[in-house]
Image: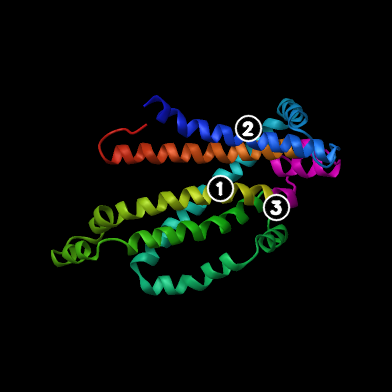
Amino acid sequence: MSSTNRQPFGIPLMGVVLIIALWKLGALYVGTEVILPGPLRVAGSLLDVIGSPGFLSALGATTLRGVAAFLFSALLGLICGVAAGLSPVFRNLVKPLVIVIKSTPVMSFILLALIWFPSGLVPVFVSVLMAFPIIYENVVAGIRNADPRLIEMARVYRVPQGRILRSILLPGIYTFFSAGARTAMGIIWKAVIAAEILSRPEAAVGSAMYEAKIYIETAEVIAWTVIAVLLSALSEFLLGRSTRLFTGIRRGGFVL
């Protein structure tokens, strides 16, 4: 029993050790920190970055942009997804727009946003566009996968539309929405930081990465990358916890 409980943690830990070992071997083979600094050099740079005066402001600003983009894309995707799931006319009307958003390179959106918005809003705008189709399509799939017999029976007995949505459609929507939200969260952080690197707002993780690149501080670029990865992982962990908590509350209990 105890070995089974330790296995899920032990295997990822072994994977991390393997990555670090391969990284160290690669750094020794390359032989120059400008190209590939070793793990210890990056760890030292990471500590320097965390202790720098602008660290908290950069991390806080990037976090606010990511959270704002997630909330707005989740709300927009939920509203449009419900409308599209219930109305084929609306779904066909929105379909070309969703296809255009999914097909357009993210760099095109960043360049256009640089023309349209202040630098601080560019990452939010781009991230919303990247995340919206994911959440929207998951919500539509949730509605279309609802049991049609239950919906038909509810309509036969003249159950109000609001109650049909609340009691029959929302449980299915929730499962698909949760999956889409977690996928969208990971994409949002990538889009936010990519847009920050190009738009270079005053306080941002992406701006700090670009500045480190200008001065060829490879270890600092990797250190900021580690911070971005940890930020993304933490946000997905918290989202997963909140999802499980909400599921427990919905079922009449708490699942932690």
Residue where numbered disc 3 is placed? 118
Mark in the foreground, 2 or 1: 2
Residue 117, percent across and down? 68, 56
Residue range in magenta is 195-221
Q: Closer to the N terminus: mark 1 or mark 3?
A: 3
Classify residue 105 by image quadrant.
Answer: bottom right
Q: Nearer the viewer, residue 186 or 124?
A: 186
C-alpha span from label 2 to label 3: 42 Å
Residue 78 falls inside the magenta stretch: no
Residue where numbered disc 1 is placed? 186
Q: Closer to the N terminus: mark 2 or mark 3?
A: 2
Residue where numbered disc 2 is placed? 17
Mark in the foreground, 2 or 3: 2
Residue 217 falls inside the magenta stretch: yes
Mark in the foreground, 1 or 3: 1
Residue 210, percent across and down? 78, 45
Kindly tell me whether residue 57 is visible in this rendering: yes
Element type at mark 2: helix
The residue lying furthest to the left in this view is 157
Q: Are marks 2 and 1 in contact (CB under 8 Å)?
A: no
Which amino acid type is shown beneath numbered disc 1? Gly
